[in-house]
Image (cartoon, rainbow, N blue to C red):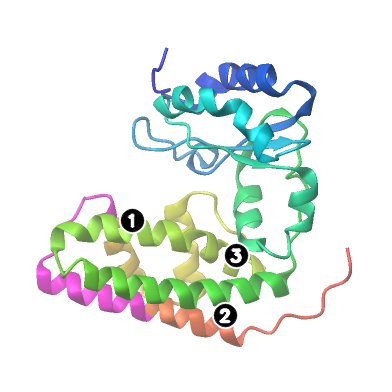
Amino acid sequence: MAKIPNRPEEIFQEFTDNLKAVYGDSLISVILFGSGARGEYRPKKSDLNFLIVLKDNSPSELAKCQRQLTKWYKRNVAIPLFLTEQYIQASLDTFPIEFLEMSSAYQLVWGKDVLSGLRSSKANLRLQCEREFKGKLLHLRHAFLESQGKVKDLPALLSTSIAAFAPIFRALLYISDIEAPRKRADLIKQLYQSFHLDSSLFETLLQIVRKEKKASETEAEYLFDKYVEEIDKLSRIVDQLVIEKEENR
Protein backbone atom coordinates (compact mmCIF):
# COMPACT_ATOMS: atom_id res chain seq x y z
CA MET A 1 0.00 0.00 0.00
CA ALA A 2 2.87 2.37 0.85
CA LYS A 3 5.20 1.22 -1.91
CA ILE A 4 7.49 3.91 -3.27
CA PRO A 5 6.79 4.24 -7.01
CA ASN A 6 9.44 3.41 -9.59
CA ARG A 7 7.88 6.03 -11.86
CA PRO A 8 5.81 9.07 -10.84
CA GLU A 9 2.94 7.93 -13.09
CA GLU A 10 2.37 4.88 -10.89
CA ILE A 11 0.68 6.95 -8.19
CA PHE A 12 -1.19 9.48 -10.33
CA GLN A 13 -4.55 7.70 -10.31
CA GLU A 14 -4.61 6.92 -6.58
CA PHE A 15 -3.32 10.37 -5.65
CA THR A 16 -5.91 12.12 -7.82
CA ASP A 17 -8.73 9.90 -6.56
CA ASN A 18 -7.77 10.77 -2.96
CA LEU A 19 -7.89 14.47 -3.75
CA LYS A 20 -11.21 14.18 -5.55
CA ALA A 21 -12.69 12.34 -2.59
CA VAL A 22 -11.50 15.06 -0.21
CA TYR A 23 -12.17 18.20 -2.26
CA GLY A 24 -14.82 17.31 -4.83
CA ASP A 25 -15.74 20.26 -7.07
CA SER A 26 -13.25 22.51 -5.27
CA LEU A 27 -10.36 20.65 -6.93
CA ILE A 28 -9.19 22.44 -10.09
CA SER A 29 -5.79 20.97 -10.95
CA VAL A 30 -3.26 18.31 -10.01
CA ILE A 31 0.18 19.05 -11.48
CA LEU A 32 3.52 17.30 -11.06
CA PHE A 33 6.59 19.54 -11.08
CA GLY A 34 10.23 19.29 -10.02
CA SER A 35 12.56 16.35 -10.65
CA GLY A 36 9.70 13.98 -11.45
CA ALA A 37 8.58 16.20 -14.31
CA ARG A 38 12.12 16.88 -15.52
CA GLY A 39 12.81 13.17 -16.03
CA GLU A 40 15.24 13.10 -13.08
CA TYR A 41 13.14 11.12 -10.62
CA ARG A 42 15.12 8.52 -8.64
CA PRO A 43 13.06 6.04 -6.56
CA LYS A 44 13.71 6.24 -2.80
CA LYS A 45 15.84 9.38 -3.31
CA SER A 46 13.65 11.92 -5.07
CA ASP A 47 10.53 13.54 -3.66
CA LEU A 48 7.45 13.87 -5.83
CA ASN A 49 6.28 17.47 -5.90
CA PHE A 50 2.69 18.34 -6.72
CA LEU A 51 0.89 21.62 -7.21
CA ILE A 52 -2.74 21.30 -6.12
CA VAL A 53 -5.01 24.12 -7.27
CA LEU A 54 -8.21 24.60 -5.29
CA LYS A 55 -11.05 27.08 -5.36
CA ASP A 56 -10.32 27.74 -1.67
CA ASN A 57 -7.00 27.05 0.07
CA SER A 58 -7.93 28.38 3.48
CA PRO A 59 -6.50 26.51 6.51
CA SER A 60 -9.85 24.84 7.17
CA GLU A 61 -9.85 23.47 3.61
CA LEU A 62 -6.26 22.28 3.81
CA ALA A 63 -7.00 20.54 7.10
CA LYS A 64 -9.32 18.18 5.23
CA CYS A 65 -6.36 16.31 3.75
CA GLN A 66 -4.22 16.04 6.90
CA ARG A 67 -5.04 12.36 7.38
CA GLN A 68 -3.79 11.66 3.86
CA LEU A 69 -0.40 13.33 4.36
CA THR A 70 1.19 10.39 6.17
CA LYS A 71 0.19 7.96 3.43
CA TRP A 72 1.48 10.27 0.71
CA TYR A 73 4.72 10.87 2.60
CA LYS A 74 5.39 7.12 2.76
CA ARG A 75 5.24 7.07 -1.03
CA ASN A 76 7.82 9.88 -1.32
CA VAL A 77 5.22 12.57 -2.01
CA ALA A 78 6.32 15.85 -0.48
CA ILE A 79 3.67 18.01 1.17
CA PRO A 80 1.89 19.45 -1.89
CA LEU A 81 1.80 23.12 -2.75
CA PHE A 82 -1.83 24.21 -2.41
CA LEU A 83 -2.66 27.38 -4.35
CA THR A 84 -5.60 29.09 -6.01
CA GLU A 85 -5.69 30.44 -9.57
CA GLN A 86 -6.09 33.95 -8.19
CA TYR A 87 -2.96 33.59 -6.06
CA ILE A 88 -0.90 32.37 -9.01
CA GLN A 89 -1.90 35.28 -11.25
CA ALA A 90 -1.36 37.81 -8.47
CA SER A 91 2.06 36.43 -7.51
CA LEU A 92 3.88 36.32 -10.85
CA ASP A 93 5.57 39.62 -10.00
CA THR A 94 6.46 38.50 -6.47
CA PHE A 95 7.78 34.99 -7.17
CA PRO A 96 8.75 35.11 -10.86
CA ILE A 97 11.65 32.64 -10.49
CA GLU A 98 9.53 30.08 -8.68
CA PHE A 99 6.76 30.16 -11.28
CA LEU A 100 9.25 30.15 -14.16
CA GLU A 101 10.91 27.06 -12.68
CA MET A 102 7.58 25.34 -12.16
CA SER A 103 6.22 26.11 -15.62
CA SER A 104 9.48 25.13 -17.35
CA ALA A 105 8.95 21.44 -16.56
CA TYR A 106 5.63 20.07 -15.35
CA GLN A 107 3.10 17.37 -16.10
CA LEU A 108 -0.62 17.97 -15.94
CA VAL A 109 -1.98 14.99 -14.01
CA TRP A 110 -5.61 16.06 -13.86
CA GLY A 111 -7.81 19.10 -14.43
CA LYS A 112 -7.05 22.56 -15.75
CA ASP A 113 -3.58 23.49 -17.00
CA VAL A 114 -3.11 26.64 -14.93
CA LEU A 115 0.62 26.90 -15.75
CA SER A 116 0.18 27.07 -19.52
CA GLY A 117 1.05 30.46 -20.93
CA LEU A 118 2.36 31.98 -17.69
CA ARG A 119 4.77 34.82 -18.44
CA SER A 120 7.01 36.56 -15.93
CA SER A 121 8.38 40.05 -16.40
CA LYS A 122 12.10 40.00 -17.19
CA ALA A 123 12.55 43.08 -15.01
CA ASN A 124 11.01 41.26 -12.04
CA LEU A 125 13.12 38.18 -12.81
CA ARG A 126 16.31 40.23 -12.96
CA LEU A 127 15.58 41.87 -9.61
CA GLN A 128 14.82 38.57 -7.91
CA CYS A 129 17.90 36.95 -9.50
CA GLU A 130 20.11 39.69 -8.06
CA ARG A 131 18.55 39.32 -4.63
CA GLU A 132 18.76 35.51 -4.69
CA PHE A 133 22.37 35.38 -5.90
CA LYS A 134 23.56 37.78 -3.22
CA GLY A 135 21.53 36.16 -0.44
CA LYS A 136 22.53 32.61 -1.33
CA LEU A 137 26.20 33.60 -1.59
CA LEU A 138 26.04 34.67 2.04
CA HIS A 139 24.42 31.37 3.00
CA LEU A 140 27.00 29.45 0.93
CA ARG A 141 29.92 31.00 2.79
CA HIS A 142 28.16 30.39 6.10
CA ALA A 143 27.51 26.74 5.22
CA PHE A 144 31.16 26.23 4.33
CA LEU A 145 32.27 27.61 7.70
CA GLU A 146 29.66 25.49 9.45
CA SER A 147 31.02 22.35 7.76
CA GLN A 148 34.43 23.16 9.29
CA GLY A 149 36.09 22.13 6.04
CA LYS A 150 35.11 18.48 6.40
CA VAL A 151 35.61 16.85 3.00
CA LYS A 152 32.90 14.25 3.70
CA ASP A 153 30.34 17.06 3.87
CA LEU A 154 31.30 18.50 0.48
CA PRO A 155 29.00 16.38 -1.78
CA ALA A 156 25.90 17.17 0.29
CA LEU A 157 26.85 20.84 0.58
CA LEU A 158 27.41 21.18 -3.16
CA SER A 159 24.27 19.20 -4.01
CA THR A 160 22.13 21.44 -1.81
CA SER A 161 23.77 24.57 -3.18
CA ILE A 162 23.46 23.62 -6.86
CA ALA A 163 19.82 22.62 -6.35
CA ALA A 164 19.15 26.01 -4.75
CA PHE A 165 20.90 27.92 -7.55
CA ALA A 166 19.39 25.93 -10.45
CA PRO A 167 16.13 27.96 -10.65
CA ILE A 168 18.18 31.17 -10.62
CA PHE A 169 20.42 29.82 -13.39
CA ARG A 170 17.30 29.04 -15.44
CA ALA A 171 15.91 32.54 -14.86
CA LEU A 172 19.20 34.13 -15.91
CA LEU A 173 19.17 32.18 -19.18
CA TYR A 174 15.52 33.14 -19.75
CA ILE A 175 16.30 36.84 -19.22
CA SER A 176 19.14 36.50 -21.71
CA ASP A 177 16.86 34.86 -24.32
CA ILE A 178 18.77 31.58 -24.10
CA GLU A 179 16.80 28.35 -24.07
CA ALA A 180 17.29 26.53 -20.77
CA PRO A 181 17.45 22.70 -20.80
CA ARG A 182 15.12 20.87 -18.45
CA LYS A 183 17.68 18.55 -16.83
CA ARG A 184 19.97 20.09 -14.22
CA ALA A 185 23.29 18.84 -15.62
CA ASP A 186 22.37 20.15 -19.09
CA LEU A 187 21.22 23.43 -17.55
CA ILE A 188 24.57 23.96 -15.85
CA LYS A 189 26.43 23.10 -19.06
CA GLN A 190 24.37 25.69 -20.95
CA LEU A 191 25.06 28.21 -18.20
CA TYR A 192 28.84 27.98 -18.27
CA GLN A 193 28.88 27.95 -22.07
CA SER A 194 26.66 31.03 -22.30
CA PHE A 195 28.44 33.10 -19.65
CA HIS A 196 32.00 31.86 -20.18
CA LEU A 197 32.35 30.25 -16.79
CA ASP A 198 34.95 27.65 -15.79
CA SER A 199 33.58 24.52 -17.45
CA SER A 200 36.13 22.16 -15.86
CA LEU A 201 35.18 23.46 -12.41
CA PHE A 202 31.48 22.75 -12.86
CA GLU A 203 32.14 19.35 -14.39
CA THR A 204 34.27 18.47 -11.34
CA LEU A 205 31.61 19.76 -8.95
CA LEU A 206 28.95 17.63 -10.64
CA GLN A 207 31.23 14.58 -10.38
CA ILE A 208 31.61 15.21 -6.65
CA VAL A 209 27.85 15.66 -6.23
CA ARG A 210 27.27 12.32 -8.02
CA LYS A 211 30.05 10.83 -5.84
CA GLU A 212 32.02 9.87 -8.93
CA LYS A 213 35.00 11.79 -7.60
CA LYS A 214 36.52 12.45 -4.19
CA ALA A 215 38.41 15.59 -3.27
CA SER A 216 41.21 16.05 -0.78
CA GLU A 217 40.86 18.69 1.92
CA THR A 218 43.13 21.07 0.01
CA GLU A 219 41.30 20.45 -3.28
CA ALA A 220 37.89 20.86 -1.63
CA GLU A 221 38.87 24.28 -0.28
CA TYR A 222 40.20 25.32 -3.70
CA LEU A 223 37.07 24.09 -5.51
CA PHE A 224 34.80 25.87 -3.08
CA ASP A 225 36.75 29.11 -3.49
CA LYS A 226 36.41 28.84 -7.28
CA TYR A 227 32.72 27.96 -7.03
CA VAL A 228 31.98 31.04 -4.93
CA GLU A 229 34.05 33.11 -7.37
CA GLU A 230 31.99 31.91 -10.35
CA ILE A 231 28.68 32.50 -8.58
CA ASP A 232 29.86 35.97 -7.63
CA LYS A 233 30.67 36.55 -11.31
CA LEU A 234 27.09 35.63 -12.23
CA SER A 235 25.82 37.98 -9.52
CA ARG A 236 27.75 40.85 -11.12
CA ILE A 237 26.42 39.92 -14.57
CA VAL A 238 22.85 40.10 -13.27
CA ASP A 239 23.57 43.39 -11.54
CA GLN A 240 24.66 44.92 -14.86
CA LEU A 241 21.86 43.54 -17.03
CA VAL A 242 19.67 46.13 -18.68
CA ILE A 243 16.12 45.03 -19.38
CA GLU A 244 14.36 46.72 -22.25
CA LYS A 245 10.89 48.03 -21.53
CA GLU A 246 8.39 45.24 -21.97
CA GLU A 247 5.03 45.56 -23.62
CA ASN A 248 2.02 45.18 -21.39
CA ARG A 249 0.51 41.72 -21.63
**Looking at the image, can residue 176 be seen?**
no
Please give the residue where the numbered disc 1 appears in the rendered image.
159
Segment colored magenta: 209-229
Please give the residue where the numbered disc 2 appears in the rendered image.
238
Q: Which secondary structure lies at badge 2?
A: helix
Q: Nearer the viewer, residue 58 or 110?
A: 58
| Residue at screen point 39% across, 18% down | 3
Q: CA distance from mark 1 to mark 2?
A: 23 Å
Position of 214 compared to 135: left or right?
Answer: left
Disc on the earlier residue, 1 or 2: 1
Position of 111 compared to 101: left or right?
Answer: right
Q: Which secondary structure lies at badge 3?
A: helix
Q: Which secondary structure lies at badge 1?
A: helix
Q: Nearer the viewer, residue 68 or 140?
A: 68
**Looking at the image, can residue 181 be seen?**
yes
Q: Amino acid at mark 2?
A: Val
What kind of secondary structure does the magenta stretch mostly adopt? helix
Q: CA distance from mark 1 to mark 3?
A: 19 Å
Disc on the earlier residue, 1 or 3: 1
Q: What mark, if any, has residue 171 been given in the picture? A: 3
